[in-house]
Amino acid sequence: MKKILLAALLLPGLTFAQNRFAQLGEELPTPNEYRNAAGAPGHAYYQQKADYDIEVRLDDEKQRIYGEEEITYTNNSPDQLEYLWIQLDQNMRAEDSDSKLITVEKMEDFRSIGDVARKQFKFDGGFKIEEVTTPSGKDLKYAINKTMLRIDLDTPLKDGASISFRIKWWYNINDRMKIGGRSGYEYFEEEDNYLYTIAQWFPRMCVYNDVEGWQNKQFLGRGEFALAFGDYEVAITVPSDHIVGSTGVLQNESSVLTSEQRARLKKARSSDTPVMIVTQEEAEENEKEKAEGEKTWIFKAENVRDFAFATSRKFIWDAQNQPVAGKDILCMSYYPKEGNPLWERYSTKLVAHTVKTYSKYTVDYPYPVAISVHSKWIGMEYPMICFNGGRPEADGTYSERTKYGMWGVIIHEVGHNFFPMIINSDERQWTWMDEGLNTFVQYLTEQEWERGYPSRRGPAYLIADYMRGDKDYISPIMTNSESIWQFGNNAYGKPATALNILRETIMGRELFDHAFKIYCERWAFKHPTPADFFRTMEDASAVDLDWFWRAWFFTTDHVDISLDEVNWYELNTMNPEVEMAAQKQRDEQKDEFIGDTRNRELIEETVNERDADIDDFYAKRDIYEVDALHRQDYEEFKKGLTEEELNLLNSGMQFYELKFSNIGGIPMPLILRFTFTDGTNEVIRIPAEIWRRSEHEVTKVFMFEKQVDNIRLDPFLETADTDLNNNSWPHEQQPTRFELFRQKQTMENPMQRQKRVDELNGQ
């Protein structure tokens, strides 16, 4: 409806700041000498160090790991430590583990005899600790509490002091195909071979820090790891025909590689394309018959928080160089023939691209190698090495879903070198700090790999379905890892989306990228907390984001901002010639009451039409006539105006009063696209602070020299608005998309279909 603007602006009553825009003071820990108010490490920040010297042997006949390690632990804290805590992650697979006991089950979960068989499946998992001693062999007092081992010290470990001790253990390696797991083995029955991806395989020191003391929360399977940095020397004994990929740098190439393999590896170190170290033909020949004896591969790694390796006689191996900030990074892939043709074509190139792109947005990749290992289904990360799925069909064809799945998981898992292997957050408590931040940079990396890459997570509109869902099954991002509903959406998707919104809409790319890089540089090789991230992003950008952290990270609210009402005004020029003509035009364009229309057609003659004496002055006058008095009044009115005011009055300026409501609870910027009757448009961006005094309803007036044809709120799908049907004026119903899937019994992928087409065409 169009209205004439005659009155002055009315000042609304002021209200106090609402909760969403209150500062986060009470929710965040008080800054101190260890972590300051700017989000940086404080002047007294400290960090423990754990160095490992390990000898491990893989039993390929029994699928067991036998190991001995010497840990040197340095207490850099100001505290005396009466005992030490060590993680025993393999104990999660013990028969009496809490992970099994706390699993929620219903009878409807058992739909087949196979489901029942899996319920009854027995596996003798967990560490078998044989010795805990001093380096000289003296027994140390220790106690095991499920996935944690405590060593009681005879005398407290003073600040600045170090202690060394030895642990001897073994465990049965799990079959990942049967019972799952982040590590384990895959058995290839056809040639009686195994592919081992070995992680969480040795007792590891817990983190001790200023935030929690000992981080010894039990490992239940979902919340991952909090680990101390240190140096490693690891001797890995495997069958003599195995190829080993590992965290660290190989120390004894001449003992475990042939001269030809060493020559190829040397070539790869200066090649910008992958070089085959072990070809598919060589790997296929190697897997045919098991060789006698064993070899020991020795690796060293400096300043890492963990160590993993993979080994198999099936491995194809390729490598290439990727320079980062003047330093050469050897990017490598290990995969069985079952991974080809995908893996030989893409894996190492993806590793190199990921290392390069993440370094641009975070910190320069500091390690000498980066490795991707192919293992069916799994996606898991460790320093310098990760295990990734993405397996083609047996005939070498694959679907687009398989290809993009492989690309995405390699980028994601290699990216974990940065979060949390370098920027070392506490995964046991805050999954989002590694998964969410990593998924965000994964999105940036995917977009630089292929234009229009169909990223699963990152763009704002992709999280809308989750955020509009049943709040009984949605957790705030700031929820402990073990207690999260909808793990993938909560820990991966929503945080990645939040950062994307910050980058694209709230802060802008330049400010965001600067602040994000500052955070990464401040906390590289340290242990950041959520507060450190929140504070650094504000400190380095001069943008108050407390409202954003509160809404996106501490609540389960969603984004649904509605454009409720548009009122259209224009200035009264006070010129009688203009205003009378305009009023006449408006009146003529009004809809007519149906009774008036029919009366005019059906009443042949009225009394005043028959009798000339009926019509008086009022019936005869022209209400739109401009007389001399009108003109005189207008001339007097103009004398009181400046030239600027008169020009403004005659400008034809259009006023639009827009009323918005915040239905979802999360305040967001108002991004508005106004399209005018001449076909042009203008985008106006209003910061989220417009909601600071009223969280639920706001009104805004816009002035234009042209008439508006339509208005669109969030036209670029950048705020994760969950209901686009209330975002337009005039109202536009957004179409619902139905995707129809037609599945053939053969599960044929497009590459297989094309093969059949080629056969029919005689190609």
Image: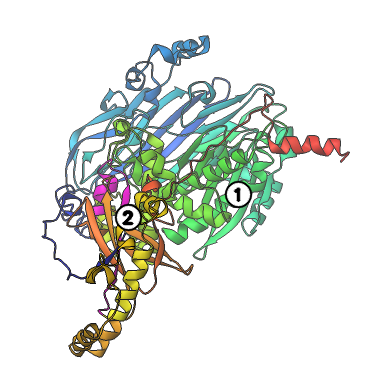
Q: Residue 348's mark? A: 1
Q: Residue at x 29, y 38 (%)?
A: 429
Other residues around mark 1 within 10 Å, as few (<14) / some (14–19) / many (≥20): many
Which percent across, then down, holds residue 439? 43, 47
Q: How is the image coloured?
A: rainbow
- Front-lying residue, 382 or 307: 382
Q: Are marks 2 and 1 in contact (CB under 8 Å)?
A: no
Mark 2 / mark 1, whichever is N-terminal = 1
Tell me, yes or no, whether the highlighted magenta stretch contains residue 667: no
Q: Residues within 10 Å of mark 2 (few under 14, many from 20)?
A: many
Of residues 71 and 721, the one nearer the viewer is: 721
Q: Which residues are magenta?
A: 546-574
Residue 231 vs residue 642, the one in the foreground: 642
Q: Is residue 191 left or right of residue 599?
A: right
Residue at image position (21%, 87%) is: 632
Q: Which numbered circle lies on residue 523?
A: 2
Q: Position of residue 740 (x, y in %)?
A: 58, 34
Report how far apart the C-alphas of labels 2 and 1 lie in the structure.
28 Å
Disc 2 marks a residue whose amino acid type is Trp
Q: Position of residue 176 (x, y in %)?
A: 51, 25
Q: Nearer the viewer, residue 295 or 48?
A: 48
Residue 550 among magenta residues = yes
Q: Quadrant of the C terminus?
A: top right
Horizontal side of 386 relative to 23 (left or right) equals: right
Q: Amino acid at mark 1?
A: Thr
